[in-house]
Image (cartoon, helix red, strand yellow):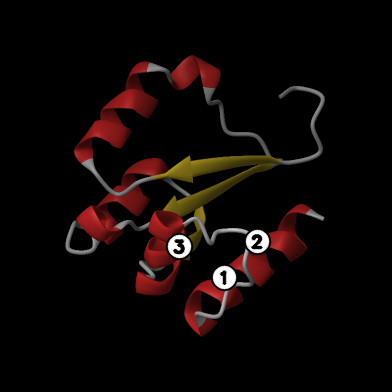
């Protein structure tokens, strides 16, 4: 991690994730190369995303829950092109950030 150009830290908007990162804080130090990304899953659709983002400081991108991506995961279609426009927009922004 110390040799990488960018580190993408994936955050799930739930208490379990908050506790995990808090208890392992020394492994996840914030650097200028760290890009924090919140990934909203089906179980996290109605969780307090804004509060979680405040807890982690500087969450740069939030992937919205996508029924299409969820379906692709269950049917083995993840290698297929992403068609969900909201998800695709955030994915493009993240790609520009880390390249």
> Is 52 drawn above or below residue 22 in the view shown?
below
Q: Residue at x 53, y 83 (%)?
A: 85
Left-right relation of 53 to 6 = left
> Is 22 drawn above or below residue 56 in the view shown?
above
Q: Residue at x 63, y 59 (%)?
A: 79
Secondary element type, mark 2? helix
Instruction: Tell me the residue that label 2 is attached to.
Output: 94
Instruction: Tell me the residue that label 1 is attached to.
Output: 90
Residues at marks 3 and 1 touching, judged by CB atoms closer than 8 Å: yes
- Looking at the figure, which quarter contains the C terminus? bottom right
Question: In the rendered picture of this protein, how many numbered marks are placed on residues?
Answer: 3
For disc 3, the neighbor class at 10 Å (few under 14, some 14 to 19, many from 20) is: many
Instruction: Tell me the residue that label 3 is attached to.
Output: 62
Q: Nearer the viewer, residue 57 or 65?
A: 65
Q: Residue at x 27, y 27 (%)?
A: 19
For disc 1, the neighbor class at 10 Å (few under 14, some 14 to 19, many from 20) is: some
Residue that extends furthest to the bottom in the rendered view of this protein? 85
Residues at marks 1 and 2 touching, judged by CB atoms closer than 8 Å: yes
Q: Earlier in the sequence, mark 3 or mark 2?
A: 3
């Amino acid at each position: 991690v110390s040799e990488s150009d960018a580190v993408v830290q994936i955050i799930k908007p739930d208490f379990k994730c908050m506790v995990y990162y808090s208890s392992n804080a020394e492994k996840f130090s914030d650097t200028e190369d760290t890009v924090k990304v919140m990934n909203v899953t089906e179980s996290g659709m109605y969780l307090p995303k804004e509060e979680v983002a405040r807890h982690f400081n500087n969450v740069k991108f939030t992937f919205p829950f996508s029924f299409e991506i969820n379906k692709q995961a269950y049917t083995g279609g993840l290698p297929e092109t992403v068609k969900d426009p909201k998800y695709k927009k955030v994915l493009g922004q993240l790609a520009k950030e880390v390249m």
